[in-house]
Image (tube, helix red, strand yellow):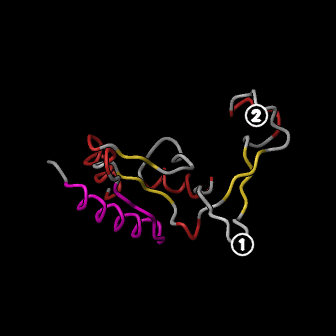
Amino acid sequence: MYIERDEAIKRIRAALKRKTGKTWSVTGGRGTAWGWITVQAPPSRRLCHDQNPDWTGFDDIPTCIRKTGRPPWIERKPKDGETGWYTSDAEAGQLGRAFKLDRRAHFQGLHISPDETDFYVKRAEA
């Protein structure tokens, strides 16, 4: 069964609201990204990232966490007039669980290709 992009967006948005009690930004790509769907925290809940001052810039993320106790970034709320771009680690985990993934979603959102749309709609609605 093939689910059209706009229908998939509506169904994912409704399923996530039922599962988490929160609204999520579920948007369709434009131009060459037409057909792709991005799921992330809405702009009002997005955060900024500052660089972890203890990160050397050369370690990968797991090594940075092991050495410093946190990833290469530090989450913070946007300051006046600043745009938050990232889903928090906590909400990325919640999003991953809502889709029954074995990992958290990426902090820039969960990106769903046109070939995976049916799979993710079923996961969200399950």
Q: Cβ–Cβ below 8 Å for labels 2 and 1?
A: no
**Label 1 crowd bin: few (<14), some (14–19), many (20+), radius 10 Å:** few
Q: Is residue 104 above or below residue 61?
A: below
Horizontal side, residue 76 vs residue 95: left or right: right
Q: Is residue 11 magenta?
A: yes
Give the main secondary structure of the magenta stretch: helix
Provide residue 100's location: percent of width, then percent of height. 42, 48
Residue 64: image tag = 2
Provide residue 38's location: percent of width, then percent of height. 41, 53
Q: Is residue 93 magenta?
A: no
Residue 53: image tag = none
Badge 1 is on which residue? 80
Which residue is depicted at the point 72% across and 41% down? 71
Farthest left residue?
1
Which residue is depicted at the point 19% across and 55% down? 4
Helix, strand or loop for disc 2:
helix
Q: Is residue 92 above or below residue 53?
A: below
Residue segment shown in magenta: 4-28
Horizontal side, residue 118 vs residue 59: left or right: left
Q: Tell me which amino acid carries mark 2.
A: Cys
Q: Is residue 7 above or below residue 65?
A: below
- 122 or 92, which is in the foreground? 92
**Which label lies toward us, 2 or 1?**
1
